[in-house]
Amino acid sequence: MIARLYITCSKYKGYKWEAFKSELSWALVNHINGNAFYNLTHPLLEAIVQQLEDEAGTAANSIPFDYRIAQMVEEVETGEVPMFFTITGNDGALPEDLINVMSAFDLEQLIRETPLMGDYARTNMLPSLIDDDEVVIHGARMFETWDNSMLGVSPCLFRDENILDEILVCLYSFFTLTGNLSSCLRLVSCGIAGHALKS
């Protein structure tokens, strides 16, 4: 009996695409992130890996493999070759034998999401925004609120006038409390960079 699971992970759950998501291709929006669980013994995976190897010397090799797999699924289900190949003038149509192999399976059941994993690639996140069931988080940049009770200081915000005086006062306060010179220098460089951006 062939196992029912082929690939499981997460579609992108971040918010960076919200403003233009409707303009993105089905394959991009619905691709399962490449950091996934794979059933290496499944004949569908073997066929797709062979196709990826066959495409090694073509323009298709410039496409990340997880996105390329979603393009293959879309082509099998719709019969349309991805726009990438039309734009680049390359013949990206899948071979008939691969289409036949893929068509023999219920792709929606074999390639699916799991609530245990979340793809937040390069998305700034607060821990409170992660779903309770998610135990594997991909690519999120996690931020915490500043806890000034831990150090007894708050982040320094510099006004335009007398910036050097303010930096020195902030640096002295932070160093007195922590004794960590490298943290102080980072704090000052962030403050100067922030000031430069405002100017």
Image: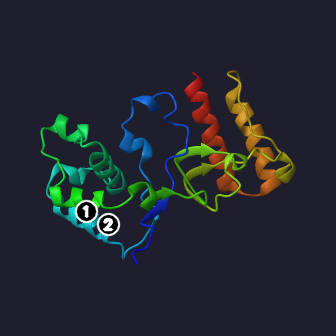
**Image quarter in which the C terminus is found:** top right
**Image quarter in which the N terminus is found:** bottom left
> At label 1, which amino acid type do we have?
Val
Q: Is residue 134 above or below residue 195?
A: below
Q: Quadrant of residue 5?
A: bottom left
Q: Which of pointers 1 and 2 lies earlier in the amino acid sequence?
A: 2
Residue where numbered disc 1 is placed: 101
C-beta proximity under 8 Å, tags 1 and 2: yes
Q: How is the image coloured?
A: rainbow
Q: Is residue 167 left or right of residue 100?
A: right
Image coordinates of residue 89 in percent, x first then y, are 12, 38
Residue at position x 39%, y 29% in the image: 23
Observer-nearest of 80 and 35: 80
Observer-nearest of 174 and 73: 73
Q: Is residue 35 above or below residue 74?
A: below
Instruction: State the SS at label 2.
Output: helix
Badge 1 density bin: few <14, some 14–19, many ≥20, Cα 10 Å: some
Residue where numbered disc 2 is placed: 44
Q: Quadrant of residue 53?
A: bottom left
Residue at position x 38%, y 57% in the image: 107
Badge 2 density bin: few <14, some 14–19, many ≥20, Cα 10 Å: many
Q: Nearer the viewer, mark 1 or mark 2?
A: 1
